[in-house]
Image (tube, grey):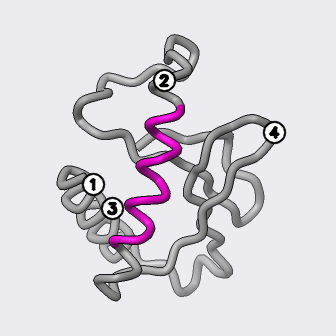
């Protein structure tokens, strides 16, 4: 996973990076790699939704390819273990793409 931009307020914007593109450094990524990351984001979102696992938004912005965007409303309801499990499921599903 790679942050697209620093966290702002309750927004966390990130990409899932497949093993084939790791290690990933945005500043060294080719246009083809960035396009692939954007496509993977869309495909992975679909898999998560179909599985009934998570409904996470994604978007592109200012020439940045599709990325996941999660808004955390309240830290009072945030469970680190739940987040870790969600990221692990995303990783597992992402490796099948």
Image x and y of residue 19, in percent: 23, 35
Residue identifier under label 1: 94
For marks 2 and 1, give the CA distance. Answer: 18 Å
Residue visible at 31% across and 65% down? 84
Outermost right residue: 62
- Of mark 3 and mark 4, the one earlier in the sequence is 4
Under circle 3, the secondary element is helix
The boundaries of the magenta stretch are 35-47
Place residue 6 in its image quadrant.
top right
Q: Main secondary structure of the magenta part?
A: helix
Q: Which disc is residue 87 wearing?
A: 3
Q: Which residue is mark 4?
A: 62
Q: Which residue is mark 2?
A: 32
Residue at the location (37% across, 40% down)? 17
Residue 11 vertical position relative to residue 57 in the rendered view, above or below: above
Q: Classify the position of the N terminus by image quarter.
A: top left
């Amino acid at each position: 996973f790679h942050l697209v931009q620093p966290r702002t307020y309750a927004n966390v914007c990130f990409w899932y990076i497949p093993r084939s593109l790791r290690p990933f450094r945005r500043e060294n990524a080719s246009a083809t790699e960035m396009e692939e990351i954007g496509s993977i984001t869309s495909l992975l979102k679909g898999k998560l939704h179909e599985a009934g696992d998570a409904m996470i938004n994604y978007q592109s912005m200012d020439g940045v390819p599709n990325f996941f965007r999660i808004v955390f409303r309240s830290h009072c309801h945030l469970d680190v273990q739940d987040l870790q499990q969600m990221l692990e499921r995303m990783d597992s599903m992402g490796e099948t793409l």
